[in-house]
Image (cartoon, rainbow, N blue to C red):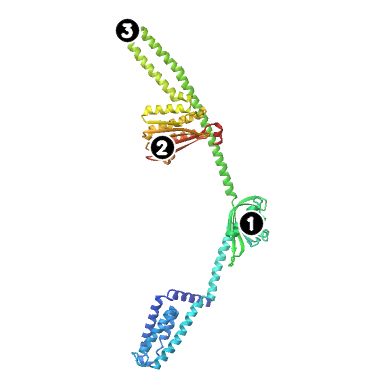
Amino acid sequence: MYLIFEKKFDSFLDKLTRSQRGGATGYLMASGLVLGALLGRLAMAPVEAGVPFLTFFPAVTLAALLGGIGPGVFALVTSSILLSYMFIPPFTAFPLTFHPEVLWTNFVFYAEELSVILVVEAMFRQRKNYVTAAHLLEQLEVAQQELKISAAAFESQEGMMVTDAKGVILRVNRAFTEITGYTAEEALGQTPRLLQSGHHDAYFYRKMWDTIGRTGGWQGEIWERRKNGEVYPKWLTISAVKDDAGVITHYVGAHYDITERKNAEAAMLNLNRDLSESRQRLRGLAAKNEVMREGERKHIAREVHDELGQVLTALRMDISLLDMRFGSLDPAVTDKVLDMRELVDRAILGVRNVAMNLRPAALDMGLVPAIEWLSNEFTRNTTIACVLFARKERIDLDETRAVVVFRIVQESLTNVTRYAEASLVNITIGHRGNELWVEVRDNGRGFDVGVATKGKSFGLLGMRERALALGGQVKITSAPGQGTAIGLTIPIDFDSAEENP
């Protein structure tokens, strides 16, 4: 009960004096106490009744106690002036002649009150150097709370180990036993070498302890061995505990088993690898289908051009022969022959266009001539200027790659016609080492690449997939109002394609 009372009283004094001592509030409080002492003295007895210190003595003492040495001295001087003026003869006046009574009265008052003020100030200044029972009780309660928190943290889901400065194990928790298989009795007195798996060399441990000595802690992934011999991964955090002098006294290690996380990561890697292989197989299948489709187009184009073209050419010759034999006999025959010849010419032109769309004959002369023919046809059909920049030397590509490059350029020009609203297109072809690069750039209105990528833009997707199937890539650069550039890079030979899946 006494300890509780002392604690509450100390707390009351701290709250009462913390903000007033040495501040302006202390002087105001001292003035109030002196005024109260004056009114109290006047209420208790007449001016000439004597006992002038009856109420001023406690007022000065309280001012020093609550306000500090400054307000205490202020209350002392103010009280002395009031005492000399009102309660020491001649009353309510300051004598012009020397009065020993006034001098000695004030001397005694000053001596007594200054002693009290100095004692009170000394008590306050020395009070913090003494530990009271109440303070001990408070510190004990705080320590007990910290111990409870530490105990709860120590018995967490993470394995905890405490060693001394030499690394001897002093304490482990239940989670440590569940992770490692070693009971507390088996682990105490041992060192952490008990758990080493041989997975890490001496340099690893030396670097780890150097970090602990330099920074006071270390954390990282480490492989250790359970009691049953199983090697497992864990996340280890080591913290050094130091005393007030900065000397390490203990080490605390937190062990977190990450076996499940590692298994999940391995499964994810395997899944990604399988997915990548599946994509490669799909791209290989798509490339094979594209090759087969181009082969069929080539075959159909030749059949249409050779067979149907020859038939139409022979038919046109027969019509001309018919006009030569019978046109002079009947003018109506001549007119009919001209109509038939016009229809045959349109059919021949249609056959040529079909064959050209299926497979341009210019591809048989090489990639650059084929793209040059394509750019000329683009300009002729759209009136959009298309300029080809290509080196004069021949670029040797196998038929599969040449067709892919040609189709990507063709698709790019088709997109310019449909969406770009451009007035100029530049096609640049070159090679660096074993890599061919092609760029199709227009000055059209451009577009947001991010939006197009998220949407179902099968034309752009098709170009990317064509290039990826042969180990290349397509890069699209565009922005609204800034035109569009489609860049293609592709290995020139099959070996490079296999090395760049």
Query: Dot 3 lies on which element?
Result: loop
Q: Is residue 37 left or right of residue 149?
A: left
Residues packed near mark 1 inside 10 Å, few (<14), some (14 to 19) or many (20 plus): some
Is 264 or 77 nearer to us in this picture?
Answer: 77
Residues packed near mark 2 inside 10 Å, few (<14), some (14 to 19) or many (20 plus): many
Where residue 449 sits: x, y (%)? Answer: 42, 40
The numbered mark, 1 or 2, whose residue comes first in the sequence reads 1
Residue at 38 percent of width and 28 percent of height: 379
Give the Cα separation between the discs numbered 3 and 2: 62 Å
Where residue 353 sits: x, y (%)? Answer: 41, 23
Q: Looking at this rendering, what residue extends furthest in the top direction?
A: 329
Q: Which mark is residue 309?
A: none
Q: Which residue position holds label 3? A: 330
Q: Which residue position holds label 2? A: 484
Where residue 166 sits: x, y (%)? Answer: 65, 62
Which of pointers 3 and 2 indicates the residue nearer the eye? Answer: 2
Q: Amino acid at mark 3?
A: Asp
Q: Is residue 78 left or right of residue 170?
A: left
1 and 2 marks in contact (CB < 8 Å): no
Is 125 or 488 nearer to us in this picture?
Answer: 488
* Quadrant of the rendered image containing residue 241: bottom right
Q: Which residue position holds label 1? A: 177
Residue at 46 percent of width and 24 percent of height: 362
